[in-house]
Image (cartoon, rainbow, N blue to C red):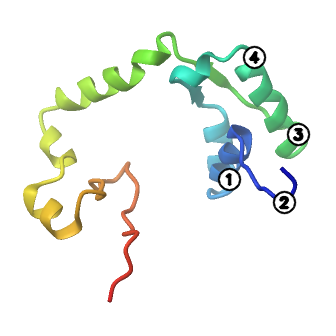
Amino acid sequence: MIGMSETGPAELINFVFNAFPLDKQQMLADNIFITGGCSQLPGLKNRLLKQLQEIRPSKSIFSIKESQIPSLDGYFGARDVVNLNDCTKYFVTKLEYDENGSEYPKEYSLGNKYYSSERKK
């Protein structure tokens, strides 16, 4: 393990915090939400609280909320998107697929920016 670098959830959360100004960082820290199968690991919430307190500035405040049904949150979120009136703007069109390939995620205001993993020649 010597020489290997790994990032845990607390470091990832802190990385996201640092991409924002201080006032936005506090807003994010007040709204940490853990979900998914791994969120059910015993002690995860307390571990995150402890590690974030060690990483963040002194006297930082955090609010970590846990999902009530973590294994189904992905389904519920997808269901809610499909039930939106204008949900098609979140789907990749055939033209976008043909232009960008199978790894292209639809770009929208709340999503990630697309960067191709292939080098342009």
- Between marks 4 and 1 in the image, the one whose residue lies nearer the viewer: 4
Amino acid found under the numbered disc labelled 1: Phe
Q: Residues within 10 Å of mark 1 (few under 14, many from 20)?
A: few
Give the number of the disc on residue 15: 1
Quarter of the rendering containing residue 99: bottom left
Determine the secondary structure under disc 4.
loop
- Position of residue 94 relative to residue 71, above or below, is below
Mark 4 / mark 1, whichever is N-terminal: 1
Percent across and percent down for residue 92 are 18, 52
Report which residue position mark 3 lands on. Answer: 54
Q: Residue at x 33, y 26 (%)?
A: 77
> Callout 3, which amino acid?
Glu
Q: Is residue 1 left or right of residue 26?
A: right
Which one is closest to the eye, mark 2 or mark 4? 2
Task: Note whether 13 is above or below 77 in the view shown.
Answer: below
Structural distance between the alpha carbons of marks 2 and 1: 21 Å
Q: Nearer the viewer, residue 44 or 53?
A: 44
What is the C-alpha distance between the residues marked 3 and 2? 22 Å
Mark 4 — residue? 43
Name which residue type carries label 2: Gly
Q: Nearer the viewer, mark 3 or mark 4?
A: 4
| Mark closer to the chain start, 3 or 2 | 2
Residue at the spot x=12%, y=33% of the render? 85
Quadrant in the rendering for residue 113: bottom left
State the residue position of label 2: 3
Q: Quadrant of residue 59?
A: top right
Residue at 71% x, 21% y is 45
Q: CA distance from mark 4 to mark 1?
A: 22 Å
